[in-house]
Image: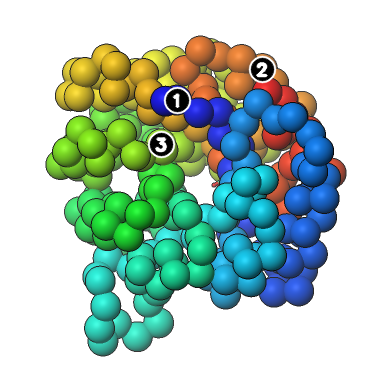
Amino acid sequence: MRKNIVAGNWKMNNNLQEGIALATDLQAALQGKTLQCDVIIGTPFIHLATVAGTIDPRLIGVAAQNCADRASGAFTGEVSAAMVASTGAKYVILGHSERRTYYGETNAILKEKVLLALANDLTPIFCIGEVLDERNAGKHFDVVEKQVAEGLFGLSPADFAKIVIAYEPVWAIGTGKTATTEQAQEMHAFIRKIIAEKYGQSLADGVSILYGGSCNAGNAKELFANPDVDGGLIGGASLSVEKFLPIVEAF
Ligand code: 13P
C-alpha cells in the first residue's frame, strides 16, 4: 500500500546530545496528533541506537543515511546493514546524491547496498535525481531511468515493493531552488510509469515516491498535493521541530 511519508535527513549535523534532544522534541510535538503520513528521521550512525531506543517507533521511524556494500569483515570504518538493523533503525537512505558525488557511489555499488538492506529487513529509501547540466540538456528522464534500472530493477517484485524512492533533483538540494510542482509531478509520474512497465501497474501504484530538494513549510503543501508525490525527504528543514512539523502537517 502506498504511504505518505515525510522523512528528515539530518546529514552530518547534530552531536549525540543535540540529536537526542531534537528527536525527543519532535516526538513531544507529534504526540497526540492525528497524522496523515509516516514520519522518519535519518540520523548519523552514532545516534541510531540511542535515538531508536528513546523514541516510540509508532510515532517516528529511524533511518540510517548509508550502509556498507559488504555484509561484514575487514572494511575499516564501514557500518553494515545488519549493524544498522541491530540498533532498531528500520530504514536506510541509499544513493543520496552527496554519497554518489563525494564518495563515488555508483549504481552497481548501490545495487549491493539495496540487497543487503533488504536482507536485513531495512526499508531502503533510494535516492535518484539529475544534476542541473543534465536537466538543461534534456537528459533528466534518461538519467533517472538509468539510476532506477541499474540500482533497483534486478529486484524481485516482492522486494521492489518494499522500496521507497526519493526523487531529489541535485540542483534543488540545499539551494533554496525547489522544483516546481509541475516538474516534480512530471518526474514522479515518469518514475511510476517505468516501474509499471517493469513490474506492473498495481505494484507501481503501491510505491511511495518522495520529493526532496529545498522542501519547506512554504512549498510542501503544494508539492504533496500532486497525485504522484507521496511525501518528502527533507534536509535543512528537518533540523528544527519548528521547520519540520509544518511539513509533516502539510498532509
Ligand atoms: P534540503 O532539504 O536541505 O535541500 O536537502 C534535501 C536533501 O538532500 C534530503 O536528502
User: Residue tagged by mark 3?
Assistant: 165
Q: Identity of the amino acid at label 2?
A: Glu
Q: Is residue 70 visible in the rendered structure shown here?
A: yes
Quadrant assignment, res 195? top left
Q: Position of residue 29 (x, y in %)?
A: 83, 45
User: Residue tagged by mark 1?
Assistant: 2
Q: Quadrant of the N terminus?
A: top left
Query: Which badge, 2 or 3, comes first in the chain's sequence?
Result: 3
Inter-mark Cα distance, 2 to 3 = 19 Å
Q: Residue at x 81, y 38 (%)?
A: 32
Q: Is residue 137 visible in the rendered structure shown here?
A: no
Which label belongs to residue 222?
Answer: 2
Q: Residues within 10 Å of mark 2 (few under 14, many from 20)?
A: some
Label 1: which secondary element: loop
Q: Position of residue 102 (x, y in %)?
A: 42, 62
Question: Where ligand 1 lies, by image quadrant?
Answer: top right
Q: Residue at x 25, y 41 (%)?
A: 159
Q: Identity of the amino acid at label 3?
A: Ile
> In the picture shown, does residue 244 fall above or below 26?
above
Marks 2 and 3 in Cβ contact (< 8 Å): no
Q: Nearer the viewer, residue 103 or 131?
A: 103
Number of numbered markers:
3
